[in-house]
Structure formats: structure tokens, C-alpha cells
Image: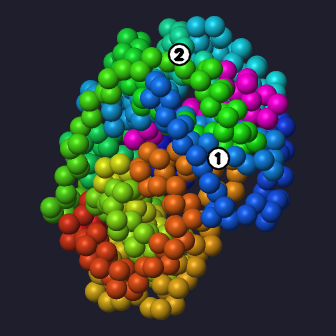
Amino acid sequence: MRNHSTTSPSWVARYRSRRSCAGLVLGALLITLLGLADRGSAADLTPARITTANGITVVVLEQHFLPIVEIHALIKTGSAQDPPDKAGLANLTASLLDEGTSTRSSKQLAEQIDFVGGSLEVRAAEDFTTASARILKKDVELGFTLLADILLHPAFPKQEFDRVRSQILGELVSDNDDPGQVAMKAFNQLVFANHPYRWPVNGTEETLSKMTLADVQNFYTREYLPNQVILTVVGDITMEQATTLVQTHFGSWKKGPPPARSTKKPAVIERKTVQLIEKDLTQSTIMLGHGGISRTNPDFYAVTVMNHILGAGGFSSRLMDTIRDKQGLAYGIMSHYDARAMPGSFWINLQTKTDTTNQAIAGVVAEIKGLRESPVTDQELAEAKSFLMGSFPLRLDSTAKLAGVLAQVEFFGLGFEYLSQYPKWIERVTKEDVQRVAKQYLNPQHYALVVVGNQAKAKVRH
């Protein structure tokens, strides 16, 4: 089964995970979860970093309590680098990496990784693409061999190109029947007008239909360079062993000039913009929001706490308390800040009965105003910070998660102290900080509103 990924939240996300096997590695991961108490805290994590002669940034974290190694490559290219008329090219290229190399067919890649109970995965996102191998310690040489093979020697067979492109096109067609997908795509078009973030990671029917094999080959040649790669190696392996394997398997990769990058930021929404999309449904799907922040914004931690109180905190959030519990307008509602390399988006989504559409929208805007106009309570602040600090270790509870977090820490330049300091940075957030960032980053007047549903009955007020 193939899924083509984005980094959107779970209700719209389509994650692509290839060659994953429920063998020895998954058994070992179960042991990992059962043994979390013996792992030590994030403060005990001490990664090491080197840069190879051909420009690969290598981050190694030794963890010897389980015989597992995760090899995780982050390539600094994603859908943000798609040419304007070729949305979906980065994802299509990533999707073809493990569909055959110069020495192995797609079937051979699958058989070799499955035979040892490992996994080989490739995922494309907006800002980067990841390719990873999870393997038992005794088979680590094979893990490096296969990961290097798909990154250095993809063959891009024509028949696989045609098949994979057709499969993605089929998924895009099916998305048209999902009101959540329809709303998200329309919302991004409004918030990220004239910016690459406006397109879905997997592209559009129009752009994919016109894409050629040469487009994929050219994108790969331009973007897949060793000096564009962060390679994190986490697990039962020493620094010396890891660096030797990296040199053996990736040392021949020829570096090149870094691809040109646009620094153009998404434009700020300067007025309320409404898009109504007709679908004969009994419920309206609502998305309301605007531009957000980048991951490197120093207010990230205050915004994280603020957003948890507003709508990311589940049943303890204000939106859930007001819109669901008190007014009975929705089964679920959430808010989300999507912090990326460039400023991402802030949005609130819910589904409500058609005839309560306007009431729900008004309730959402009222909650945004309320958070801006008065300080949060001591209890709200304490509960939000307690949850965010307490749940942080769960983001580091496996070799795969650790490798992914370390790669992004390096990509965004957050520093290895992030692993130990995150809880402290959350703890420092005050009520004044929450209100300040609410005023600065929430706008109850200038926002994009998308409503998917029966518009004649919803009668959305502009």
C-alpha cells in the first residue's frame, strides 16, 4: 500500500510508508515502549555531529539498550521547491526513489529489507524530504546499503513513473469527495496566495498530468546532493562505526552547487476572505485562519502554549469547552499552528450542522477575540504547560522518533540543547506572554474562511 504524504494534521494527512514490516524490529519497538522508564531523560541525550568531505551533516546518537539502528536522511528539498507549474514534483520524485535503482528492482529492495524484518520509508513534505531505514544492529550494513542505493542510484523506471503518477492522480480524485481535504486545499490557496505553500504536497490533477519523467530526473539531479543532506543515525551503534559506514556508502556521492532558494515569505492577509464551496451535505466543514509563524520564531514556545489553551488542548481547550460542550455545535474542534521554514498557517477546523454554520463561525471568532483581550487563568496556563512538558518525552520514545526530531533540530538550527531545554522554555511562558502573542499572531478581523457544504441552507453571512 502506498500513501503520498504531507505534513498536515491527521484528519487530512496522507502518509507514504513503504516496505514496512511487522517483524523483528516492531517486536523490539514494543520492548522499547515497555522500557521507557529505564531510558533516562532527554537531558541524558548527547548527540555528536560531523560534516563529511562531500558535505553531509552527520548526527549520531548512541543508544545501546536495544539492538536497533535508525538511519534517517533529511534532504533539504520539498514541495516548496516545486516549479510553479509542476506542483507535486518533489513528492513524485521521492515516491520513485525506492521503485528501482541501477542495481536493484523495486521487488528486490522490498524483499531484502523484509527478509531481515526492517523498513525502508520515503516521505515528502513542504520543506524537506526524508528517507529512512530501520534495521536490527546485526543487519546495519544492509540498512546503509539500501538507503544509500535509493538516494544515490535511483533508476526512475518509466513504467514505475507511469504507475506511481497514475496512483497519485487517483488519490487526488478521491480527495475531491472528502470535505476536509477540499476545505484544506482551498484554505491554503487563500492563505498562501502566490507562494509555493499554496499547493498540496502531492500536487494537482492538472500539474501531475503534464509531468514527465525528464522533470523527475532533472529535479533529482538539481536537488539531491550530499551537501543538501542531514543524516541522523540513532541506536545501537558507535560514533566510529557510524562514520565508517557513512563514508563507505555515501562517500562517493558528488557534491554540487546548492540549488537556488527563494526567500519570499507568504503575504499577510489584509482583509477577511471567504470562499464557499458547494457540496450537498448535512454538515458544513469550516476552516478559519490566517498566516502563522516560522519554526525559528522566538515566540514559538509562547504560541505553542497559547494555541494549546485555545484549541490544541483537546477537551481542556477553550474552543472545545465553548463550541462543543456549552453550545453543542460540533463533535470536535481544534486549532493548529503549522510552523515551517517560512511562516506557515494558523487554522481552526470543525464540522457543524448546516443550520448552525453561522453560529459556529461567530463562536470561533469570539474565542479568538477573548484570548486577545484578557489574560488566561492561572489554571489554564498551568495545565497547558504541564501537558506540553509532560508529553515531550513521548516525542523521543523510539529510535525512529529521535532520529526524526534530531534531523529537524539540525534543519531548523535549534541546537542540541533543544532536547533538554524544551520543557524549560515552555515553563518560562507567562500569562503576559500568552496574551501578547495572542494579540500579535491572532487576528479576528483579517482571516480566510472556507465553508464546504450546502450553501443555500447554511446562508453564510459575509
- For this orientation, the residue located farthest to the left is 270
Residue 211 x %, y %? 36, 18
Tally the numbered discs: 2
Q: Is residue 128 magenta?
A: yes
The three-letter code of the residue at mark 1 reads Leu
Residue closest to the eye, 359 or 37: 37
Disc 1 from disc 2: Cα separation: 24 Å
Q: Is residue 195 above or below residue 55?
A: below
Of residue 17 and residue 397, the one placed in the foreground of this image is 397
Residue that numbered label 2 is attached to: 252
Q: Give the residue drawn at x 30%, y 54%.
A: 343
- Residue 273 position (above or below residue 368): above
In this orientation, does residue 15 appear?
no
> Horizontal placement of 267 versus 293: left or right?
left
User: What number is the disc on residue 61?
Assistant: 1
Which range of residues does the magenta coloring cover?
122-145
Residue 444 image point, x, y percent: 25, 73
Say whether residue 181 is magenta: no
- Secondary structure at badge 1 equals strand
